[in-house]
Structures are given as structure tokens and as C-alpha cells.
Image (tube, rainbow, N blue to C red):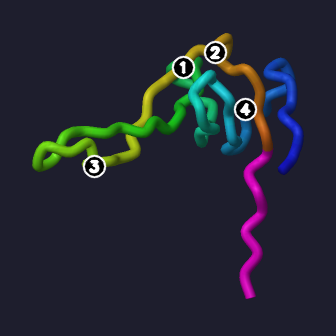
Amino acid sequence: MAEWQPAATVPRDRMILADIGMPWACLAIWNEPSGQFCVTELETDLYLGQWNDTAITHTYVAESMLRGWQELPEVRRG
């Protein structure tokens, strides 16, 4: 896997993988109106007494929360 790039070099013109301190990387993109990064979050709720109702949501985080970033891997088809 690619090395993490310094947060100070994060691009604002495309989606990236971001390290914002969670145990996993998340998809992120700069959101100009909010002046923050829009990032994916994993949400888990109870269903029939078990923590098995998973979903992906999003939130906004300040650029200062970004610890590092990577380019998204290329998808090769065919």
C-alpha cells in the first residue's frame, strides 16, 4: 500500500483516502461551502438484540483533523 502523505499536502480537487484518527481510513472530499472535508463514517445499530445493522454515513471534519492522506487506488477492469 502507498505511504501516507502529510496532511499539509492534501488535494482539494478529488476524492482521497483520509486518516482522521479512526482505526480505518475513510473516503473524503473537500466541501467548499462548509470549508471542511466531507468524510465517510461507519454507523452500527442494534437489530434483533445484536450490533449488526451497519451503514455508511457522512460528516464534516475540519482540515486540522486530517493526519494524512493517500490517493484512491486505481480500479482496473478487463
Q: Position of residue 8 (x, y in %)?
A: 83, 18
Q: Earlier in the sequence, mark 3 or mark 1?
A: 3
Q: Which mark is residue 12?
A: 4
Left or right of residue 23: residue 71:
right
Residue at image location 79% in from the left, 46% down from the top: 71
Up-down: is 53 above or below 24? below
Kindly check if marks 4 and 2 are in contact, taking CB atoms under 8 A apart as contact. no
Report the magenta residues as a range. Answer: 71-78
List the residue tagged with mark 3.
Answer: 52
The main secondary structure of the magenta stretch is loop
Mark toward the viewer: 4 or 3: 3
Residue at image location 26% in from the left, 48% down from the top: 53
Spatial CA distance of label 4 from label 2 is 15 Å
* Quadrant for the C terminus in the image: bottom right
Q: Foreground residue, 25 or 62?
A: 25
Spatial CA distance of label 3 from label 2 is 28 Å
Up-down: is 15 above or below 5? below
Q: Foreground residue, 49 or 14?
A: 49
List the residue tagged with mark 1.
Answer: 61
Q: Amino acid at mark 3?
A: Asn
Q: Which residue is most to the top?
A: 64
Mark 3 lies on a secondary structure that is strand
Kindly check if marks 2 and 1 are in contact, taking CB atoms under 8 A apart as contact. yes
Spatial CA distance of label 4 from label 3 is 34 Å
